[in-house]
Image (spheres, helix red, strand yellow):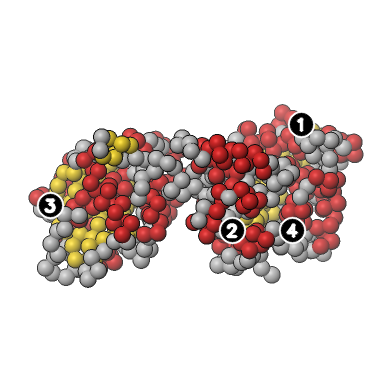
Amino acid sequence: MTTACTDWAARLLAGRSIIPAPIYQGEADRALEIFKGLRVVDVPGKPTFGECAAPWVFDFVAVVFGGCDPETGKQAIREYGLLVSKKNTKSTLAAGIMLTALILCWREDEELLILAPTIEVAQASFKPAASMVRSDPELSDMFHIQEHIRTISNRVTRNSLKVVAAEADTVSGKKAGRILVDELWLFGKQAKAEAMFMEATGGQVSREEGWTIYLTTQSDEPPAGVFRDKLNYWRDVRDGKINDPKTLGVLYEFPPEMIESKAYLKTENFRITNPNIGLSVSQEWLEDNLKKNQAKTDGAFQQFLAKHLNVEIGLNLRTDRWAGADRWQAAADKTITLDSLLERCEVVCIGIDGGGLDDLLGFAVAGRERDTGKWLLWTRAWAHQSVFERRKSEASKLRDFERDGDLIVVEHVGQDAEQVAEICRAAYDSGLLDRIGCDQAGIGAIAQQIVDADVPQELLIGISQGWKLHGAIQTTERKLAEGVLWHAGQPLMDWCVGNARVEPKGNAIMITKQIAGRGKIDPLMASFNAITLISLNPAAAMTPALIVL
């Protein structure tokens, strides 16, 4: 058995289902009979699912409930992911699935759980489920609704469906076998979300019939945290890169080539990520709002693409973006490491930026490759532990970069400077180091640490910031466009490049931390400092490089 769907792009383009057939058709049919009889109260006329839902909805319900072996009670597929654009009946579908599971539950005193990231989402998930019960006399007799605690309980078996807003204390001790997580993208912004999920799903260890369903739209920012991890894993399973028959990702998204060509802007393609178009999603509304938002520079267009077309926010969607963002990802070479850069290059320059307690310390090494003359770029950043408290909105992303190895978190003040000095010394010992360029503001302690590491002080150069970096910024853009500049493809730098905003200043442009706002750009600024120096065409080292790291 496989849950891969390697021809998913062709299926979506042809209007065919990307959801596999159920493993146990009898179990699927039993669940569908119940599900199709539930009433959708917020639709005029209060039709049943069977009367108003699209075929893809029935396919998804069938594959969830049709994953359970009727003889053993064991669930074959334990994790489901559904990525679908906004307004494609996601919350209503969640209510219908969980109410069906509650009706079919054979245990007593069992708890089913809908886990929402906020109180507002929890209310939106609970309301349709409660309305389905109230609209059916038989279900009203069977179940008791407690609005204040968002709970629906079976009067006989005492089984219950609870909708909770995810906070550490609300999921602690939960022993649910069947769990639905709504709006996974919002959990991606919570640094402790992974721990919450582990706590919430802990009850499944003794419940072989258990499963977890994750429902989500795309994020309004580059994917982060548990959302990024889950989405990437589902894609790998779908594409056959990972063989995991217990995981199924149903992802309504555009194929990469359509993202590259911006074919998602063609109105005839809206249906690809909106399987409910013509029902709960208005084609006309999508067309009108595309026109309204396309020229906006305040992020509204970005939001529209992410939420209504499932276009993952990357580097090149904002109108005030740095021009280099358009070519950044195409210039990635993941073979570049610090060691390989020192091995391949005839001369290197270093750039350093930042380093406050609520900031990142950005570090960049730019080198000119022997024989080819290409510029190679590698970066790293450091942060104190306190940054996770001071920058709570960014904590989830920063933890991602820590796991990637691009961000080093230190416990004590000064450890970051010591590690920077070690790399500077290694570059100096290799015989390749030309100069080190530093932001003159707040760099004194780090500069002293570098000198204390026996790197000659005359190699340290102050680099003017603000509009005076205009030349380095333009040089970087030009070298990316020419295919001369290659970088290590590090997610941290992708994020920084995506955060960079451009502001005109006379005949120049500026990229500064103040313009970027809460989004960090320190490693990018360090890169501009390094590129300022490498663009001066320093002489090649006379001795071969020594690999010392």
Disc 4 crowd, CA 10 A, few/some/many (<14, 14-19, 20+): many
* Residue lying at 13% horizontally and 54% vertically, measured from the top left: 455
Question: Contact, CB < 8 Å: mark 2 with mark 4?
Answer: no
The residue that disc 4 covers is 63
Per the image, label 2 sits on a secondary structure element best described as helix
Per the image, label 3 sits on a secondary structure element best described as helix
Q: Earlier in the sequence, mark 3 or mark 4?
A: 4
Q: Which of marks 1 and 4 is nearer the N terminus?
A: 4
User: Amino acid type of disc 1?
Assistant: Gln
* Residue lying at 39% horizontally and 43% vertically, measured from the top left: 321
The C terminus lies in quadrant: bottom left
Q: Which mark is residue 481?
A: none
Q: Residue 459 carries which label?
A: 3
Report how far apart the C-alphas of labels 3 and 1 lie in the structure: 71 Å
The residue that disc 1 covers is 146
Q: Residue 234 carries which label?
A: 2
User: Amino acid type of disc 4?
Assistant: Val
Give above or below for 8 relative to 494: below
